[in-house]
Image: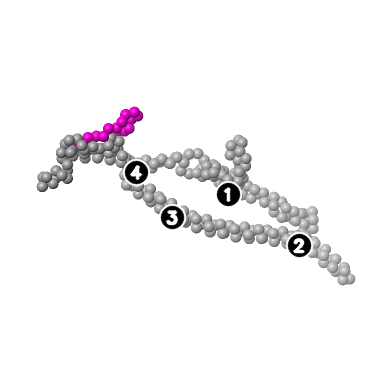
Amino acid sequence: MLRDLMKVLQVREVLGGKMEIPGELLQIPIEDKPLLPEKLKTYPQMVNALLMAIDRHGIDAPITVEIEDSDKTKAGNQEVSYTYNSPGVALQAALELLHEIKADANARLSIQIGLAFAVTRILKIVAGSGETLKQIISMLGLPFRYKPKKLQLEFNLSGTKQGFGENTKEKDVADLSKEELEQIIPTLLSGSEIDVPVPTFNPEDDDLREMLAKISIVQSSKKG
């Protein structure tokens, strides 16, 4: 039995200094100084070397995560930090976040597709209604004049058309880089005001009732 144990544990090799562990696992590399392997002669030294390697190259706790800018929609740097006392808790949080992001991405994609169809349908209705109204006004020959009215918008679309830098030209949104898109988000969310042409009656011209009365008089005179 002792002979079998000697074969498995190789006691003579350990005592002879043939048991080595790479120096890179236990030491910090220094420039121009080679890291020599550590020779182990006892099993306690072996266990101690393994613990040192785990301590140096394992995950140190607590783990602190610093996010430089947590809210791209606000100007400035909204820096936040999170601390995890356990590497296992930190890993669990990372994996949960990955699954949550994947689920949220699928939900956002479905919503975006639905919104794209809805917005397109609304634009068709608005465009058709506007053109129909113009044709009715034209057919009636009403004395309409267009007067600009102020309309408040939740977005500032003009901000997305501004160039970046002193010598840059105006860019289309599709040509902007990720960094440039992040720069225009606060401006885009600042809101804006635009002029919308609204048809109004010209008070100096006849209104519809007077025009109908004149048409009735003319028609009556023709019959007489």
The kind of residue tagged 3 is Ala
Q: Quadrant of residue 117?
A: bottom right
57 or 124: nearer the eye?
A: 57
Q: Residue at x 27, y 37 (%)?
A: 22
Query: What separation in Å lies between label 4 and label 3 (alpha carbons)?
Result: 24 Å
Q: Quick check: marks 3 and 2 in contact, CB under 8 Å?
A: no
Residue 150: where, in percent of width, then height?
65, 49
Query: What separation in Å lies between label 3 and label 2 (alpha carbons)?
Result: 54 Å
The kind of residue tagged 4 is Tyr
The residue where tag 3 is placed is 103
Query: What separation in Å lies between label 4 and label 1 (alpha carbons)?
Result: 39 Å
Number of the front mark, 4 or 2? 4
First reached walking from the N terminus: tag 4 or tag 1? 4
Query: What separation in Å lies between label 2 and label 1 (alpha carbons)?
Result: 36 Å
Residue 208: where, in percent of width, then height?
77, 61
First reached walking from the N terminus: tag 4 or tag 2? 4
**Which label number is shown at residue 84?**
4
Query: What separation in Å lies between label 1 and label 3 (alpha carbons)?
Result: 28 Å
Query: What separation in Å lies between label 4 and label 2 (alpha carbons)?
Result: 73 Å
**Which label number is shown at residue 139?**
2
Q: Is residue 47 left or right of residue 81?
A: left
Q: Which residues are magenta?
A: 26-41
The residue where tag 1 is placed is 154
Residue 140: where, in percent of width, then height?
76, 62
First reached walking from the N terminus: tag 2 or tag 1? 2
Helix, strand or loop under label 1 = loop
The kind of residue tagged 2 is Met
First reached walking from the N terminus: tag 3 or tag 2? 3
Q: Quick check: marks 4 and 2 in contact, CB under 8 Å?
A: no
Helix, strand or loop under label 4 = strand
First reached walking from the N terminus: tag 4 or tag 3? 4
Q: Residue at x 75, y 60 (%)?
A: 138
